[in-house]
Image: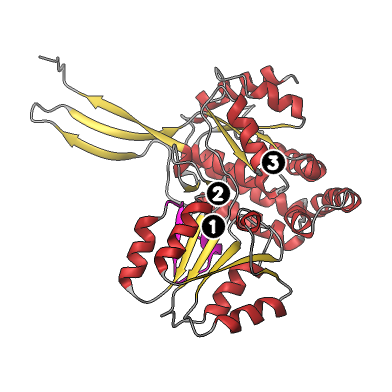
Amino acid sequence: MIILDIAKKAREASLKLQGLSEEMRLTALDAISKALISHKDEIIEENKKDLEEGKKNNLSPALIDRLTLTEKNIQALSLMCLDIARQKQVVGMIVESHTREDGLLIQKQRIPIGVIGMIFESRPNVIVDGAALAIKSGNAIVLKGGKEAQYSNRKLFEIIHRAIQSVLPEGSINLVETREDVAELLKLDQFIDLMVPRGGSALIKYVKANAKMPVVAHDKGLCHMYIHSDCSLDAVNVVLNAKVQRPGVCNALETLILHEKYPKNDDILRALKEAGVEIKNPASESDFATEWLDKKISIKFVKDYTEAINHIKKYSSHHTEAILAQDPKVIEEFMNSLDASCIAINASTRFNDGGELGLGAELGISTSKLHAYGPMGANEMTTTRFIVTGHGHIRK
């Protein structure tokens, strides 16, 4: 099917999805959840093809990690669909209401954006995340994954499509597969309401430069953590979690900033080395500007928190910034001085994630400020409109 036809069908589906009952949305999510489990062997088999190709093409360990689907991953995706289903209804809900003195009722209602285009790299699980969140938020979605996950993406889409075809309108969930498809999709602003690129800087720049519709970018995560001199918690544990648990993800720690008078700096550096992390100390300007997505970390020593804040301002990607400290004035200054989608206080950067923050899943972590900032769940995939109800009211 040509891209124009896919976009048209998605637009037609979006108009029907807005009026769909919440019960039907939950039925669709339940069907996907069950289908993932019943077809898990097929998914793993197709994923093996992507992993074999990835190894032949010398993909980094971090990319291989993001590409890998296991039985445990599939079980988590199945549960995620149920978690999203259990969340509060989003579509059609009245979020504000007041009645004027003349009796005119003014309400603000939450509605779907319409048709969302999403272009992403590496992670095949995004097919399921995107589909589930689109269903919950009443949107049609057009998904385009990277070629490195083509077999996994195609199989997951087939399973989802079969699971929902008797419940949702045709064209509700769509998959396109080539770069040529993307170029064409970016022109179709009369059918696509919002474009969401999730991946590296090259992808983000391309979409921003070519999209005729609004773009919410999910750019790189050059995440920092500053440890103040008065830190009293187990900083080693927090740092290792932020850097080593999954080094190839966007909320992993990339630059560690240490107050030179913090007494346990050597313990932290030693623990990182023992965990197999390559330490860039001293780090260069290029190092500080790099999102490693690997077992590498840039180190910066500072004399005070102001120096730490200024360093982060210079290199921040507006994703996640963390501080380990006790002094409330230092914490407040850190929080109020930095522009990031998530500020983590005495916690790992790894918590900037839709599932961890109670969204069930995420379309991605927006580093834009319009229309959303941070993880985009079902709520962030909607907008609002006014409903005005009168009794023959006329404006004077």
User: In this picture, is 93 found above or below 6?
Assistant: below
In front of the other: label 1 or label 3?
Answer: 1
Q: Amino acid at mark 1?
A: Gly
Identify the mark at residue 362; answer none if there is no mark: 2
At 85% across and 50% down in the image, what residue appears?
54
Can you identify the residue that label 3 sits on? 160
Q: Is residue 154 left or right of residue 191?
A: right
Residue 351 inside the magenta-drawn segment: yes
Measuring from the top left, give residue 10's x and y in whole percent: 60, 25
Quarter of the image with the N terminus is top right
Can you identify the residue that label 1 sits on? 355
Is the C-beta separation of discs 3 and 2 under 8 Å?
no
Q: Amino acid at mark 3?
A: Ile
Identify the mark at residue 172; answer none if there is no mark: none
Q: Nearer the viewer, residue 58 or 305?
A: 305
How crowded pointer 1 is (Cα within 10 Å; few <14, some 14-19, many 20+) is rated as some
